[in-house]
Image: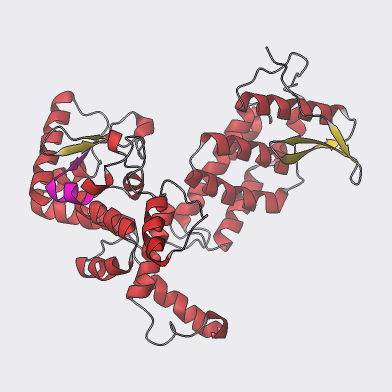
Amino acid sequence: MPRVRIPKYRKHKPSNLAVVSLGGKDYYLGKYGTKESHEEYARRISEYLKRRGEQVPAEIRVSPHHSKNITVVEAADRYLTWVTSERSPAEQAHVHGMLTCLVNLYENELAAAIGPAELREVRRVMVAKGWCRNYVNEQIGRLKRMYQWLAAEPLIPITTYHAILVVGGLRRGEGGARETEPILPVDEATVDATLPHLPETIADMLRLQRITGMRPNEVCLLRPCDIDRSDAVWFYRPITHKMAYRGRERVICIGPQAQRVLLRYLARDRETFCFSPRDSESKRRAPRGRGKGFVFAGQYDAGVYRRAIHRACDKAFPHPALTKIKASDLTGIQRKELRIWKSANRWSPNQLRHAAATEIRRKFGLEAAQIVLGHAKADVTQIYAERDLAKGVEVALRIG
């Protein structure tokens, strides 16, 4: 059996800090030669080898007790490493934003010293950044989950985690946090005006979502192997979905009209994503002979999908005076006016889902809308599940 190569514990002479290089990145371990730096080295090596599926040598031992003296920035680094390997890219971005607020305030403080007062200060900074009340509450929830993870490692005392739980969420009108407007459905005329300005693949994703009422992420994740095409109505079961953690199954009914949109994206490997930036860009660049040597991702995510629609909205609904002026020539007042204009004339994929819900509810009733959009309760019986699927099939046959 080949011997596992262990990266060396080294000294960074300019700073007198210990350092180890893992995966092409340097990690500083604390003052060179100290017990703490050697224990941090052992912890880093253990995590690195486990991620690679290699056995941790017996001589690498991690003490679970010294870590209770870690600083906020060290705790944030460890948690972000774990999130990067265990959570989705979208969740990683949210966690990164939360950690930025925390670290900017308390970078060199002990992680165990963070209590309710410090948590409220982090929340105040989030409000000052312009985040809406609901998002601030979500981010504070992520910070609490981070401390739960730290306590479980154990990197901080469990009492620290328990202490911050007393800080509740912001209520409406509290703390000066702004409120968001309710998400309204986008009208058909607006969607039709946007479609010509979208790449072909994104336009078809939009058409499919418009008919079926899928969530944006469900459109992005669609693969041939996830679709049962054995009947007149196809059944799409996403590999993951919003309520999967509660053990619920998500089944999306795809009727004839949606099938026509989707059909030409199914002639590919069964586990390849139907809607791919690689395919979209090759179509767009091929007529002009551009793009050779570029490597594009094999899957869209909801963020890219949303931004593509926003760019199309900017083209479909240009500002009557400012759009043709170069950005560098705009005054501060003009830039603000243009931002307000774009914000007012952009719509997002979730609004398509709201539009589908409104239409289905109007034609088939509230229960049918809940079923098609995946809003059914988790504890329904098998009889209700069969009845619900039948309603979904009925809707798909009649509207697409």
Q: Where in the figure is residue 346, as x and y percent of width and height?
A: 36, 68
Residue occupying the far front of the picture: 289
In the image, taking residue 326 as reference, residue 368 lies left or right, namely left
Q: Where in the figure is residue 189, as x and y percent of width and height?
A: 21, 70
In the displayed structure, 349 sits above or below 335; it is above
Count of labels in the image: 0
Residue occupying the far bottom of the picture: 321
In the displayed structure, 345 sits above or below 353; it is below
Which residue appears at 63% of the width and 52% of the height? Answer: 100
Q: Is residue 170 visible?
A: no
* Quarter of the image with the N terminus in it: top right
> Magenta region: which residues?
250-261
Which residue appears at 35% of the width and 33% of the height? Answer: 244
The foreground one among 107 and 220 is: 220
Which residue appears at 27% of the width and 66% of the height? Answer: 195
In the image, taking residue 8 as reference, residue 258 lies left or right, namely left
In the displayed structure, 46 sits above or below 280; it is above
Q: Is residue 382 visible?
A: yes
Q: Where in the figure is residue 43, as x and y percent of width and height?
A: 72, 27
The foreground one among 285 and 72 is: 285
Which quadrant of the view contains residue 12? Answer: top right
- Colour mode? secondary structure
Which quadrant of the view contains residue 197? Answer: bottom left
Which residue appears at 43% of the width and 46% of the height? Answer: 298
In the displayed structure, 225 sits above or below 134; it is above
- Asked if the stretch drawn in magenta spans residue 30, the answer is no
Q: Where in the figure is residue 235, as x and y percent of width and height?
A: 20, 36
